[in-house]
Image (cartoon, grey):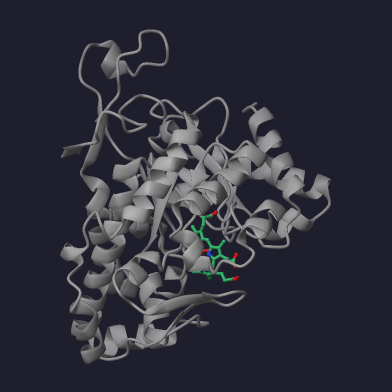
């Protein structure tokens, strides 16, 4: 176990009692916390304005710009967390992989990784050599952001090895990630090396964010839903566990705060040591929820395809859930959206705790005033 430094927002007590952190730790809050995947980005005019003339990955590596973009949706919507503005391919770029993000398309790689030799070329960069200097711009952006956020937690994130491999093997976005799924069977040894390398690069990125001040971390395995449970368990889950192991050891102590929401352990005078909460999310992963929890996550993100009460049942009713408003509903008339959000909140009661989110990212054409209204609705809602 490794203690976070005393100035870290969790260790210093600024975010340890927040609705978000407590919900991820399975403690139901009177007010359900809410944030949105892709809350920073093209749905916000202030984002579009700031990004003019700057390429996506350059914006991610400019600490002042990345920090400002992270803060924009927190100021505007009053959400319960910031999600660090970056991208899942940023650590690959920092590890020397030639990649760019094409607007409207996504990550595109100069060289696809298709063979054992291609994997060996990646391995010429030893992930263990990616030190503080590699992630200096990331750590600086996190520090600037958490200084502004005060007692609102920042969520760090990284891409899971399979989702990154789905891009690397294809060389860009693909529909069913078929080349990646072929490689895992055609050359399981090369596949395992690719997954281990990606896990360590992504894990180092995640660790840099948490050490610099993130109060929670989310692993995005967006495309894991294209896998069977058997393939996921055999060829993917070990690498996702490996990615999370880079932050699993990070702990802090909840300070004694008599009467002011101090934990039971703290009130009993015992040290209350907790780990930084870890969330695991994928799209179309209804069949994988249990396996995704088992890799070492504290909470599981659920997309909009299965209701939260069913997701909680599949998780044995012991795992905090995050989700799962259908992004398509954001453009529906308010009464339709409101009824849907209330339904999600009611179903979320089946889990020990619930963080409201979308089932996937905010569509770029979303009217941002609708998101603010959803936040107000969620914050005003109480379990009957
Ligand atoms: O607010 C947030 O959620 C934080 C920022 C964030 C971005 N990417 C910024 C971004 C996060 C968490 C990601 C993760 C990410 N990136 C994932 C996992 C989450 C998911 O959506 O499933 C994936 C699969 C990627 C890869 C990626 N990067 C895609 C598919 C795209 C979209 C391409 C497009 O233009 O539609 C990107 C680019 C990207 N990442 C944008 C943003 C704000 C758009 C870039 C722009 O504004 O031009």
Task: Identify which residue, 246 or 175, lies in the foreground.
Answer: 246
Residue 21 placement: quadrant? top left
Residue 320 in sight here: no
Residue 288: % across, % down: 40, 62
Which residue is depicted at the point 40% across and 86% down?
110
Against 186, is 105 above or below? above
Q: Quadrant of the C terminus?
A: top right
Against 226, is 279 above or below? above
Give the left or right position of residue 162, taking residue 54 as reference.
left
Residue 13: % across, % down: 36, 24
Give the left or right position of residue 362, taking residue 286 as reference.
right
Residue 214 placement: quadrant? top left
Task: Identify which residue, 335 or 157, lies in the foreground.
Answer: 157
Task: Identify which residue, 314 or 167, lies in the foreground.
Answer: 167
Give the left or right position of residue 271, taking residue 255 as reference.
left
- Tally the numbered discs: 0
Q: Quadrant of the N terminus?
A: top left
Residue 267: % across, % down: 29, 11
Residue 69 in sight here: yes
Give the left or right position of residue 121, taking residue 39 as reference.
left
Which residue is depicted at the point 60% across and 74% down?
103
Outermost residue to the top: 259
Task: Identify which residue, 310 or 114, lies in the foreground.
Answer: 114
Residue 56: % across, % down: 53, 67
């Amino acid at each position: 176990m490794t203690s976070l430094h005393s100035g870290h927002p969790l260790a210093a007590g600024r975010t340890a009692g927040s609705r978000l952190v407590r919900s991820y730790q399975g403690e139901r809050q009177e007010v359900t916390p809410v944030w949105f995947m892709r809350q920073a980005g093209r749905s916000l005019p202030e984002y579009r304005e700031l990004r003019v003339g700057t390429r996506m990955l350059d914006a991610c590596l400019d600490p002042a710009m990345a920090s400002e973009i992270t803060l924009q949706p927190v100021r505007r919507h009053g959400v319960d967390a910031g999600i660090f503005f970056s991208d899942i391919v940023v650590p690959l770029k920092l590890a020397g992989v030639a990649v760019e993000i094409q607007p409207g398309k996504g990550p595109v790689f100069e060289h696809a990784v298709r063979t054992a030799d291609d994997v060996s070329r990646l391995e010429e960069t030893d992930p263990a050599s990616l030190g503080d200097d590699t992630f200096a711009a990331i750590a600086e952006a996190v520090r600037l952001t958490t200084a502004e956020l005060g007692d609102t937690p920042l969520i760090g994130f990284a891409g899971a090895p399979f989702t990154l491999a789905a891009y690397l093997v294809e060389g860009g976005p693909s529909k069913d990630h078929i080349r990646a799924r072929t490689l895992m069977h055609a050359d399981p040894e090369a596949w395992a090396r690719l997954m281990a390398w990606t896990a360590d690069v992504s894990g180092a990125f995640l660790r840099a964010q948490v050490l610099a001040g993130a109060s929670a971390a989310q692993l995005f395995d967006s495309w894991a839903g294209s896998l069977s449970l058997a393939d996921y368990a055999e060829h993917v889950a070990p690498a996702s566990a490996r990615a999370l192991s880079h932050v699993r050891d990070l702990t802090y102590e909840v300070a004694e705060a008599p009467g002011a929401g101090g934990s039971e352990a703290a009130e009993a005078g015992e040290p209350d040591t907790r780990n930084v909460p870890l969330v695991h999310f994928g799209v179309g992963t209804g069949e994988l929820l249990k396996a995704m929890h088992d890799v070492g996550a504290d909470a599981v993100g659920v997309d909009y395809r299965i209701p939260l009460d069913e997701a909680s049942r599949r998780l044995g009713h012991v795992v905090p859930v995050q989700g799962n408003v259908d992004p398509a509903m954001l453009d529906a008339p308010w009464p339709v959206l409101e009824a849907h959000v209330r339904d999600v909140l009611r179903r979320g009661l089946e889990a020990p705790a619930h963080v409201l989110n979308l089932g996937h990212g905010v569509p770029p054409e979303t009217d941002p005033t609708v998101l603010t209204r959803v936040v107000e609705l969620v914050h005003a809602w109480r379990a009957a």
